[in-house]
Amino acid sequence: MKKFIKTSALIILTGILSFAVYKFVIEPKESYQSIYLVPENAAFIIESDKPFKAWENIVHSKAWDHLRTNTFLAKLDTGIRSIDSLINSKRYLLKLLGNRKVLISAHSYNNNYNFLYVIDLKKFSKLKKVKNYLPKIFGDDFRLTQRNYNGVEIFELFDIESSEMYYFSLIKNQLVFSKTYLLIESSIDQMGKLIIGRDLNYIEVSKRISGKGLFNIYIHFKYFDNYIENLLGKTNEFLSSVSKSLYYSGVSFDIDENALIKLTGFTSVNDTVNSYFLAILNSGKGSQKILEVTPQRTASFIRIGFDNITSFYENIENSLEDDIYKNYQSAIQKIEKRLNINIQENFFKWIDNEIALVQTQPSNLGKNNEFAAIVKAKNKSVAKKNLDFITKQVKKNTPAKFKDIDYKEYTISYLHIPGFFKMILGNLLSKLEKPYFTIIDRYVIFSNHPQTLKSIIDDYESGNTLVNSVEFYNFSKNFSRKQSVFLYIQTPLLFTNIEEFVGTQAWANMKKNKDYILSFPRVGFQLDNVEELLKLDLTAQYSQQLEEFQPVSYDVERMAVEPVDTSINIQDSESGDLIEESGIVIDDLDANKLKEYYESGQLKLTVGIKNGLKHGNFTEYYENGSVKTKGKYKEDKMQGTWSYFSDKGELITKRKFEEGKEIIK
């Protein structure tokens, strides 16, 4: 942390030097752009025309007041406020420095990332005798040397106390500064190359956002996925795939008085690459109606809109490479021949203009099982007719056997075609390996687990959907009602499942900083195709108080009915332990019996099953093998007399139930 503070102070002092040394200077004949000195391998670039204003708005915001209590950020805050105090105590320096353009770029050297700072000194740039004044500015704690590289002086500033070396140079009207001499040399080399500064893809996004926001961020996709891999400790396959299709993203950053963070910008696209990602974005937009059935307890939600399913499907097909396309067509033909169905007629034709991928609130089902795909149908009857036909053909032409079950007047069916969704829609629905499905209104919902479908039905019936959420409604005002891709995250609900996406060390750091991550409970991201560029909008909402996400219905016609709590807690009179019969998850609608085991392999419980519901005898065991609980279920509800035993086999008590409710005499 001390090193960071010293680095920041040195940058400022070196900039101040240009004003302190000369009372007046001559305006340079040539004004050289800062971006011309940024080496080509920049993973990202931060740019600000008014760095001190941006600095002040961020560190004096409500969000920073909370974030600076973090152990690491507290040290950073101390350094920031020290420098802030120094600059504000000399208002004339603030006035002189306040409007200087500053670029900060990140570069990889020897598997570590280092930063280059480029400051536009404008007319205060001709510092011919700077070496004579530096020792007086920095004092006896530093030793100054200099050398020549390709006709340009590089100054080397050695910190005697820490043994750190800092490097800077004055190139035309620009000051470049770094802790890595290779970056200074690379910056000097750029004078004859101008790789980024003359790249039309960079220029295209830069001119759209220049001068907007507190500062701008440019992502250079050619090198950015390597930076993310270094940061997270593991490869992100999705980002690596997307990076091949994109050149640069440029976004402007703003934060308002309520600490609502907004990033708005554009991305240049590599049209020469066939991309599944771009195929989606080139398919138009769709109305955002699917929120009517999306649960409020959604952890993450990706909605994809398109003009019509025909163009969407064709764009996806066209994005496939020749060999993959041939294999894809061959697989489709085999399925159609084997089942005697037509994929276009029986599946795609009834789809309307939007699909959503939903990950619901984490429970004990597992990450992939709590994933659902919601497909909007043009007509409910037509969708049901065609899906019924497909399931009928599966039963008729394969040995697969399964039953439909009714739950609250909704039918849950099983589409037993392994790999079907991945085959026809690629990675979009690759997680649906053995999809169960149900139809709610005109929305067909697929999931790997029937319990996920039951939960979504419960949420819909009680009105606990995003369309009825005041919090989501207010947050969604930051986005348009029609878009190609919309991502919505409720951080507190998603946090538990993030571990699988990051490396071990990154996850350890995230757990340590959980409260700070959760202080941004809602994040939204919108992506559209605009004038051959991708337009993106990201908004993150800061909250001073961590939210407990309890779904609340705002639709008086669908007020939630409190569920009956059928869990039983009996205290063992001898050991004081709690004996609990908790919820049991059924993940196979075909089964007629379920067994669960302890980690040791010892039988934990057995229960009868009928149509995916607990039905029949139930017996739960202690790990020592003795019976813990005995009773019966009738269509998922406790029925009749239930007996509870100690781990020594002694009867503790008996209770009587009727349709899940205890009969108390």
Image (cartoon, rainbow, N blue to C red):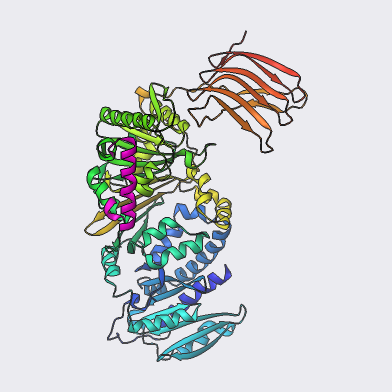
The answer to whether residue 196 is left or right of residue 298 is: left
Find residue 165 and report its image quarter: bottom right
**Residue 177 to residue 319: above or below:** below
Pinpoint residue 281: horizontal percent, then vertical percent. 28, 52
**418 and 355: which one is in front?**
418
Pinpoint residue 316: horizontal percent, then vertical percent. 29, 51
**Residue 640 to residue 176: above or below:** above
**Residue 490 to residue 202: above or below:** above
Find residue 187 and report its image quarter: bottom left
Query: Residue sitting at 64 percent across and 14 percent down?
Result: 655
The answer to whether residue 109 is left or right of residue 574 is: left
Query: Residue sitting at 51 percent across and 52 percent down?
Result: 66
**599 and 499: which one is in front?**
599
**Residue 279 to residue 417: above or below:** below
Where are the magenta residues, as a range?
A: 317-342
Pinpoint residue 308: horizontal percent, then vertical percent. 23, 43
Residue 543 can be seen in this image: yes
Q: Main secondary structure of the magenta part?
A: helix
Q: In which quadrant of the rendered image does the C terminus lie?
A: top right
The answer to whether residue 261 is left or right of residue 382 is: right
